[in-house]
Image: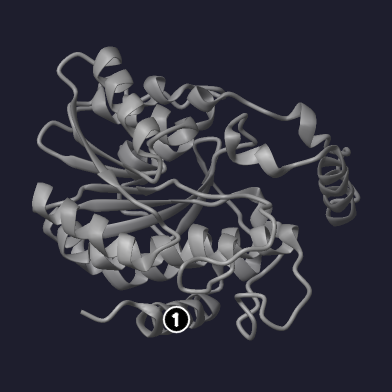
Amino acid sequence: MTTTSEPTALDIVAGADLSGKTCVITGASSGLGRESARALAATGAHVILAARNAEALADTEAWVRAEVADAAVSIVPLDLTSLADVASAAAQISELTPAVHVLMNNAGVMFTPFGRTAEGFETQFGTNHLGHFEFTRLLFPALVAADGARVVNLSSEGHRISDVDFEDPNWESRDYDKFAAYGASKTANVLHAVELDRRLRDSGVRAFAVHPGIVATSLARHMTNDDFASLNKSSASRNPDKPATDFRKQFTTPEHGAATQVWAAVSDELDGQGGVYLSDCRVREAAPYAMDETRALTLWALSEHLCTAAAPRA
């Protein structure tokens, strides 16, 4: 499998055979999820596309079938801002397949204005972390049944902006900061992978967190020129010994951006590994607080409490 400096997702899966296996991708209706779906379908896997926008989801299904001969594709509606919808999507997936070999938690929002999910969670923490936390938990039986599964959480170098505030994860007693909220949600994605890997590795499930690069997708739709300037300034203050970064000039395309998450899903170079942070198709160092096992356990307990308390009663 190719691991050149700038491979595409399709380059990564060249020669890979996932026939008979099932891959689930959240946020599969556009951008990185759409490119990952095409690449994984090309391996012969059954790819289940999950996303909120039904029309875009149907468009992606048609696109993948047109791009990949004999593609095995299913679609499942999924709105990560509603735990009831998360439960419904997980139940539908369980009806489609007894085992999930790859779960790619790809969906996300970035730098959104203040808002809350159906259960009252802050939008970025609730969507990027808690929705995926609960979705993954509900798919535990299918992941274990795969007898060798991988969970790929899409994080970001944005995790270096901030840690999770365990005392106020949903911004109930602080003035909202969309950058810090995003950073916390991306840190949570890494911590989730660390603890998930610890809990399930003996059952054959390994978990990874991925930085895909700065990708030109609709994820950045809430960003203004002032936002880019703030990010550049923040990056410079955190890395005074490195050349200044202009985030507006660092964008890559989805087909290249999806390479690392697809590599995490299929590469035999990662056999026997888990609970690590990946970027540019390599294992990288994340911020220490994002890899801290004690903090990962604390976040797990908090997430479990929040989701259990808010979950709809049968």
Q: Is residue 81 left or right of residue 141?
A: right
Q: Quadrant of residue 226?
A: top right
In which quadrant of the rendered image does the C terminus lie?
bottom left
Compare residues 63 and 274 and report the one nearer the observer.
Answer: 63
Q: Residues within 10 Å of mark 1 (few under 14, many from 20)?
A: some
x then y, percent, for residue 153: 44, 53
Q: Is residue 179 above or below residue 188?
A: above
Residue type (three-letter) at the residue carrying disc 1: Leu
Q: Is residue 39 above or below residue 206?
A: above
Compare residues 194 and 168 and report the one nearer the observer.
Answer: 168
Q: Is residue 303 left or right of residue 58?
A: right
Q: Residue at x 40, y 60 (%)?
A: 132
**Residue tagged 1:** 306
Compare residues 7 and 104 and report the one nearer the observer.
Answer: 104
Compare residues 83 and 201 and report the one nearer the observer.
Answer: 83
> Is residue 255 in sight in this rendering?
yes
Q: Is residue 112 left or right of residue 75?
A: right
In which quadrant of the rendered image does the N terminus lie?
top left
Q: Residue at x 67, y 69 (%)?
A: 163
The coloring applied to the image is one colour
> Is residue 14 in sight in this rendering?
no
Q: Is residue 307 left or right of residue 216?
A: left
x then y, percent, for residue 223: 74, 42
Q: Residue at x 69, y 56 (%)?
A: 113
Q: Is residue 243 above or below residue 14?
A: below
x then y, percent, for residue 88: 24, 60
Q: Residue at x 30, y 51 (%)?
A: 150
Label 1 residue SS: helix
x then y, percent, for residue 252: 62, 26
